[in-house]
Image: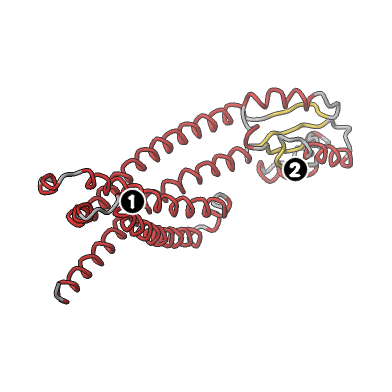
Amino acid sequence: MSKRNIKRKRRVGGLQVVTLCISTSLVLILLGIVIFTVMTARNLSNYVKENLTVTVMLNEKVTMQESVKLCNELNTRPYTSKTTYISPKQALDEHIKSMGADPTEFLGGNPFVGSIEMQLQADYANSDSLVWITKELKRNVKVTDVAYQKDLMDMVNTNLKRVSMVLLVLAALLTFISFALINNTVRLSVFARRFSIHTMKLVGASWAFIRWPFIRRALFEGLLSAVVADGILAGGLYALYMFEPQIALIVDWKVAAVTAGSVLLLGLFITTFCSYLSVNKFLRMKAGDLYKV
């Protein structure tokens, strides 16, 4: 074989690797966006639930020290995320600021009592849990009432379930489409070397021996594609953070790590598995069938 043909084959092979890596990277970016969206939606769901406020109204005879002690007790409960004590004076100041009128001028005293604003853990921010939580709180003699927006809480939980279901269906559909796209790309790469596969069969090479160079190449291409995809996703996440720093409340390092790791594993698995299937397909073919593909 002449040096010109060797150079031409190397150039064609290199072009195939670049094309496959670009195609696979684009698909992995799509998968990474889906994984990132699903995980972010979960964190957003927890963030919304944990910011729903349950107001615990206190007896007017309860002192500030007793209220602080009660806050500390509530913070030890498994369903509590955070508590904030609102003194009668603070409640009065907030009323004057929002309404623009001072009720003490015509009532002769402060009509507000102390209260505790409590945020729940996300798993307990639902109507079923709040039924028994309310009963438990009301058994305390210092508590006169427990108030929360039941309709708002039910609406939030219902909408979050619907959004989560839509995202899961979308993720499954896009995963299937992505697998099909990468499979076609890998199959085209193996198709170009189908006669080489048959030649190695004729000289007595085992299937495992024939398959290994393709698997090794697929691992390299999958790794390279995943690294490129992770780099682009990281750049997009950084740009998103620079545009809106508050996104850090929802997107933590776990989301970023799981997304990057998932893209890497999917890149390695899908390219390797598709290469394995494609090589096996041509290994089963007879010489005459190779011209009909």
Q: Is residue 98 left or right of residue 26?
A: right
271 w.r.t. 159: above or below: below
**Residue 95 falls left or right of residue 280:** right
Q: Nearer the viewer, residue 259 or 133?
A: 259
Image: 164 above or below 230: above
Point out residue 195 in the picture as x, y percentages from the top left corner: 17, 55
Q: Which residue is mark 2?
A: 84
Badge 1 marks a residue whose secondary structure is: helix
In the rendered image, the quadrant that contains the N terminus is: bottom left
Query: What is the basis of the colouring in this image?
Result: secondary structure
| Residue 208 disc label | 1
Of 88 and 254, nearer the camera is 254
**Residue 120: image location, x then y, percent:** 68, 36
Q: Is residue 90 left or right of residue 199?
A: right
Residue placed at 68% from the left, 46% from the top? Answer: 97
Query: Please, what is the three-letter code of the amino acid marked with disc 2?
Result: Thr
Q: Is residue 30 left or right of residue 111?
A: left
Identified at 31% across, 60% down, the residue is 21
Q: Residue furthest front?
A: 204
Q: Residues within 10 Å of mark 1 (few under 14, many from 20)?
A: few
Instruction: Give the mark count.
Output: 2
Tell which residue pokes out farthest to the bottom in this image: 3
Camera-side residue of 214 and 262: 214
Q: Which mark is residue 8?
A: none
Q: Height in image: 155 above or below 225?
A: above
Residue type at tag 1:
Ala
Q: SS of the residue at dot 2?
A: strand
Q: Nearer the viewer, residue 285 or 59?
A: 285
Task: Give the distance between the C-alpha atoms of the residues marked 2 and 1, in whole angstroms.
Answer: 66 Å
Observer-side mark, 2 or 1, equals: 1
The residue that appears at 77% across and 40% down in the rendered structure is 75
For residue 101, what is the image quadrant?
Answer: top right
